[in-house]
Amino acid sequence: MANYATSNSLGGTQQAVSSTYKTLLNVYSLSTTSARRGRIYDLLVGTNGTPADNYMEWDISRFSATAILTATAVTPNPLDIADAVFLGGSTANATTENTYVNNGVGASVFYVGVNQRASYRWVAAPGSELVYPATTLAGLGGRTRSGGYTGTATMQFYANE
């Protein structure tokens, strides 16, 4: 499997964090003829705004349809330049939220609360990667919210397919 990096800093205007979830980054199966399962095996989250003491909630949830037209398409970069291009899709900085499974209830596969001053990294234990199916436009969306912070946030996925 080839490994790729994708980030919400690769495209579009970063969305301001609010008290409701804002989707920062998506990865998903794209093609109906060559759809592949993908896995997020590493992720980094943080802020690039003015430091303060606020909490931020980070979530990765499954979605069944993406807000592709209201987010910027980004091209995941292969970690090994000899690898083929990413066959799935990735979008960043959505202005309309994804159609999350059950509105995100029961669809969350990752959740952590972090102080705004801290960045956070998660690395999957072998066999515990976050998997999205080989179903067109089904994938995983990374989102955040905060009751106090209203600046912008950063998210990066390392994924393979």
Image: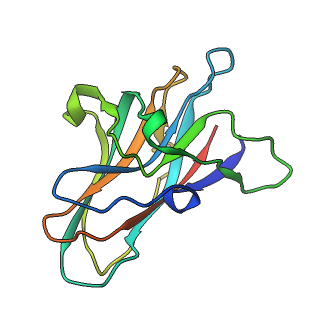
User: Quarter holding the C terminus?
Assistant: top right
Residue 53, given in percent of the width and then of the height, sits at: 19, 82
The correct choice, above or below, for 65 with respect to 155 in the image is above
Which of the 4 image quadrants contains residue 150? bottom left
User: Quarter holding the N terminus?
Assistant: top right
Please state which of residues 79 and 153 is positioned toward the viewer in this rendering. Answer: 153
Residue 127, given in percent of the width and then of the height, sits at: 50, 42
Relative to 91, 95 lies left or right: left
Residue 87, given in percent of the width and then of the height, sits at: 68, 33
Please state which of residues 85 and 110 is positioned toward the viewer in this rendering. Answer: 85
The residue located at (59%, 27%) in the rendering is 30
Which color scheme does this rendered protein use? rainbow
Residue 121 visible: no
The residue located at (45%, 44%) in the rendering is 128
Please state which of residues 76 and 15 is positioned toward the viewer in this rendering. Answer: 15
The correct choice, above or below, for 56 with respect to 140 in the image is below
Relative to 31, 63 lies left or right: left
